[in-house]
Image (cartoon, rainbow, N blue to C red):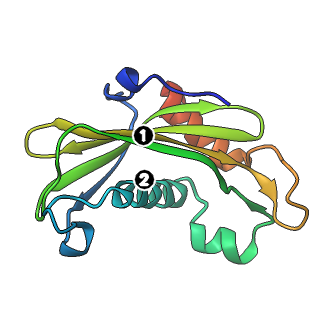
Amino acid sequence: MFRFDREDLKISRPHAFVLRCEILFQHIDAAGIIFYPRVLEMFHDAYASFLTSAGAPLRDVMRADTWIAPVRHAEADYFKPLRLGDVVDVEIAHVHVAETETTLGYRVVRAESEEVCAVGQVVHTFVDRGTFKRIPIPERVRHALLRIQTGIGD
């Protein structure tokens, strides 16, 4: 399994996919800061939005396509607290593409100050929905991933 270095994940890339969101009441814990699994949910929200931009909206994939891409590994590191009302950019800034899986590197950045608050990575393995056997990454998704990784196709 490919893994990004935590320090590398702190660095933005010009071809990053960005989803802007606000920290809502349901995202925070009793200490008034983001409840840690919510960051993984934000990663997933960015991933779902990315799939839509790649021509593979998750709702359509789940209804009609023969492939799915379950998570094989997920992790996050937290550097600065996020509080109610903070606006953040969730970036898919780093991508490693293999034949049947991809590792997505995320940054959560406070929009106002560009402060890196969290980073993480998620590995998705592409499989046939019926057999759960690995398959190559669908071409439209591969092309969009490579656009983030290299800027090719802009």
Cα distance in 3D space between marks 1 and 2: 8 Å
Vertical arrangement, residue 44 with respect to residue 111, above or below: below
Q: Does the residue at mark 1 contact the one at mark 2 (Cβ under 8 Å)?
A: yes
Place of residue 138 in the rendered image (x, y in percent of width and height, measured from the top left)? 74, 49
Q: Which residue is mark 1?
A: 120
Residue tagged by mark 2? 43
Q: Residue furthest front?
A: 30
Which residue is depicted at the point 48% across and 43% down?
Answer: 75
Three-letter residue code for mark 1: Gly
User: Looking at the rendering, which quadrant does residue 49 occupy?
Assistant: bottom left
For the question of whether residue 102 can be seen, the reply is yes
Q: Residue 26 placed where, x, y %?
A: 25, 75
Amino acid found under the numbered disc labelled 2: Phe
**Mark 1 or 2 closer to N-term?**
2
Q: Position of residue 110 (x, y in %)?
A: 16, 45
Task: Tell me, yes or no, if residue 153 can be seen here.
Answer: no
- The numbered disc on residue 35 is none
Mark 1 residue crowding within 10 angstroms, few (<14) / some (14–19) / many (20+): many
Mark count = 2
Q: Between 17 and 153, which is closer to the camera in this rendering?
A: 17
Which residue is more in the foreground, 66 or 139?
66
